[in-house]
Image (cartoon, rainbow, N blue to C red):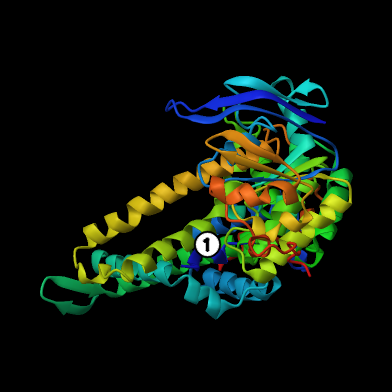
Amino acid sequence: MIVIENLSHRFSSGRLGIDGITLSISPGEFVVIAGPNGSGKTTFIRHLNGLLKPTAGRVLLDGINVTRDVVRARQMVGMVFQDADSQIVGETVYDDVAFGPENLSLGHAEIKERVAESLQAVGLTHLTDQRPHLLSGGEKRRLAVAGVLAMRPRVIIFDEPFSSLDYPGVQQVLRQIVSLHRSGHTILVTTHDLEKVIAHAGRLILLADGKIVRDGLPGDIIKDAERFGVRAPCASRLGLEVSSWLN
Amino acid sequence: MAELTAFSFRAGKSLLYCLDPRFKLLFLILISLTSLKAGSWGMLFLSGGLLWLLPAARLSLFPVLRELRYFLLLLLVVFAARALAIPGDAVLTAKFMTLTRQGLFDGALVCWRLLLVVLLGLVLTATTRAAEMRAAVEWILKPIPLLPAKRIGTMMGLIMRFIPVILNQAKETAEAQRSRGVENRKNPVYRLTKLGIPLIRRTFENADRLIVAMESRCYCENRTGPELMSTRRDWAALLVVASLSFLMLFL
């Protein structure tokens, strides 16, 4: 579904953000992309829906280059950003979720249906008319997810979804991610904190200095994480199996 | 710092919520213009009407006035300036300043008018979704050539959304600076600069993030807007508002 070939990005300052990344992601995968700050996680994922243009290489979604049809790419690959506050554009919860479908110039009935469906999926139906700045941290993240779901994407990327959240907030968001994966979405999560999410992932990619340094089953490569600046979960350090934060 | 959050939509089910936003904007303009010409009886009549409207907009007078306290201070300045500047029968004379009866009356009337217009604006924003307001502004601006109506509408919506966020950031920044003893510095310019620069920087950084998030959700100007549909109820309301405005001019 997603094929990335020799992808590199150099910033205007001359610094190399990512360097020669090649990989493919199959439909329905749950991939965690981990790496320390500045390893290129965010730069990498922003190429998957055309927010950044590669300096070299290409990203193919179902065989079509992202840069050839950016609108299609953004519909297909939804992105939930780290800072939910600056992602929420509507003055009410409803308005925010409707923003994406409105941009697709859909009809009013279709927009209403998508908003209702998305709010129900994230459990925010009761807050339809609430003002977003009054929501809790976890609710804001779920609203950001609803805004993405209303575009009906097949792939959802979460950029550091657990940052600044308390334990219940992390559980709410994690439950949402797992439920989206179960409903057939391909999930990509970037994080520097494996502890909270790795129990649910089927694949772990470690990034360092803009390059893929490890790619495989979490159980096989998690022991190498600390060599590349990512703290391994407590359980795996003790030689135990990592358990879910939802248990 | 929540002062301006009073100017936000509050969901409700009264008649005010059902009216077409274009009509509501027209009512605001009509009543504001009428209040410029209305005398004290007309203003009393208008104030009574407004007090009746506030609960329908899910607003209570005293909490609203508390949130508008800085605006009330501004009105106080306006009142003092009018009371001292307008010539007439002296009520109080101290050194080079003379308070006149005409000045007091005129100052009170001007402040009353300004307050009523602001409260009417508050009723409008509290009962109209930002998206509807945006659509109404776009509809009004559409016939004007060279004006990017859709872009202006989007900017309006974003301003409404981000005012509380910016106020919260200002509060956070001010608290962080207070915790580092900024209150020991008496120079207001120094304090304002130290608050303003990081706040502006954060606001621009947030604006950058917002642009990326909007692009990620396929932002385009040719978007589906809310349906604007006038009904008999809107025309009936227009008839009532126009008649009362006309009546107010003669009170």
Q: Which residue is mark 1?
A: B117
Disc 1 element: helix
Q: Residue at x 55, y 64 (%)?
A: B5
* Residue B25 in view (yes/no): yes
Q: Quadrant of the C terminus of chain B?
A: bottom right
Mark 1 belongs to which amino acid?
Val
Side of A121 relative to A213 (left or right):
right
Q: Position of residue B58 (x, y in %)?
A: 67, 73
* Neighbour tally class for label 1: few under 14, some 14-19, many 20 plus, Cα within 10 Å: some
Chain bearing tag 1 is: B
Q: Position of residue A22 (x, y in %)?
A: 68, 27
Q: Quadrant of residue B192?
A: bottom left
- Residue A110 drawn above or below residue B179: above
Q: Residue at x 88, y 52 (%)?
A: A182
Q: Position of residue B156 (x, y in %)?
A: 58, 46
At 23% across and 62% down in the image, what residue appears? Answer: B188
Q: Is residue A129 visible?
A: no
In the rendered image of this protein, does residue B155 appear above or below residue A126? above
Q: Quadrant of residue A79?
A: top right
Q: Answer left or right for A186 relative to A93.
A: right
Quadrant in which residue A215 is drawn = top right
Q: Nearer the viewer, residue A93 or A78?
A: A78
Residue B155 vs A121, above or below: the answer is above
- Residue A5 position in % (x across, y down): 70, 23
Front position in the image: A161 or A148: A161
Q: In the shown orientation, is residue B70 left or right of residue A111?
A: left
